[in-house]
Amino acid sequence: MEHVAGLCSPVTAGETGPESSDGPSEDEGLVDAFGDLAALPVEVEERRPTCVRCCRPVKVCLCPFLPPRALDVNTCLYVVQHPAEESRVLRTVPLLAACLPPAKCNIIVGRRFTEEKHPELAAVCQDSRTLILYPGPQSQSLEEVVRAGELAANAKHNIIIIDGTWSQAKNMFLKNSLFHLPRQVQLSRTLSSQYVIRTQPSNICLSTLECAAVALSILEENEDILEVLLRPLRALCSFQLQHGAQVHHSKEHLLKNGMYDKPMPKNKRKIKRMERLITDHSACPR
């Protein structure tokens, strides 16, 4: 309606020529026409009621698939979320948060994090008990670190997970020096993603919820945690598939089977990265 108001602004004398006494002017007719339109009732679309626990519309609530009570864990999870993830409809982080105590699942949204603006996160990054889950040449296998007893026994560890696309996560990791302070770990366990309603770069790429589920099950030395956290994700995907969603194969699967129907990139670095997805099963899309 702002544009309409602009059209209805007063016209100064001399802009429309001499006034006519034969009836209303053309401008007055436009004003009346827009006035009639403005008087029409506006239909306001009501938002569907949302479940306060799983953050899903009430009609498709996933609470029956969540644990009756929040999981009792010692590890404190910090999900550093790219702002673009907030607008995605089928996010996994709300399901993760619904399974854990509020104090054990902290979600921090942003791109840039400094000690001045985020003193609590900075303190966590500087804590010797903190790990950051991010693959790379400097990262160690989380399973091997735990198996070797390199983590203090009975200590309450923190683990940071970056939530975003692979390119967003890479950008956030490289441009935030705070994330270079904790011990860097990665998952060496072979696990195919069950988040089949969203395309992953490779077969070994996992959603944020799946990464958290595997990491917590390792740190807590409790395999039941993995099943409890994956249950609502399976239910979400099953519901979407029943209502028209398609199974999204990974880019690696599409390339290997000649099913990739998008134009190939012209950038040589991107081409090499896609070639690695085909030839190197353990390649991470960094």
Image (spheres, rainbow, N blue to C red):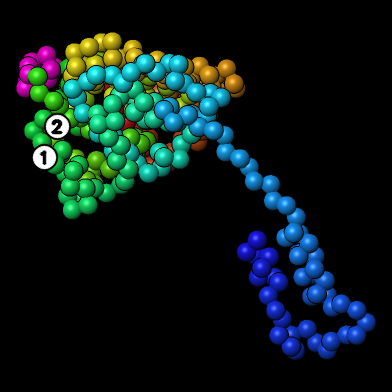
| Whole-percent x, y for residue 135 in the image | 23, 29
Q: Nearer the viewer, residue 171 or 63?
A: 63
Q: x and y percent of residue 155 in the render?
A: 10, 23
Around disc 2, counting alpha carbons within 10 Å, would you say few (fewer than 14), some (14 to 19), or many (20 or more)?
Answer: many
Looking at the image, is 29 positioned above or below residue 165? below
Tell me the element at label 1. Answer: helix
Q: Is residue 22 magenta?
A: no
Q: Whole-percent x and y of residue 140?
A: 15, 25
- Given residues 82 and 54, the one toward you in this image is 54
Residue 248, visible in the rendered structure: no
Residue 93, numbered label: none
User: Mark 2 highlights which residue?
Assistant: 130
Element class at badge 2: strand
Residue name at image x 21 percent, y 48 percent: 118
Kindly identify the amino acid type of the residue bearing the numbered disc 1. Gln
- Looking at the image, is 47 positioned above or below residue 131? below
Q: Which residue is identified by label 1?
A: 126
Q: How many marks?
A: 2
Q: Are marks 2 and 1 in contact (CB under 8 Å)?
A: yes
Of the pair 269 and 109, the residue shown nearer to us: 109
Location of residue 23 (image quadrant): bottom right
Q: Specify few, some or many for label 1: CA neighbours under 10 Å numbering under 14, 14-19, or 20 or more.
A: some
Most common secondary structure along the magenta stretch: loop
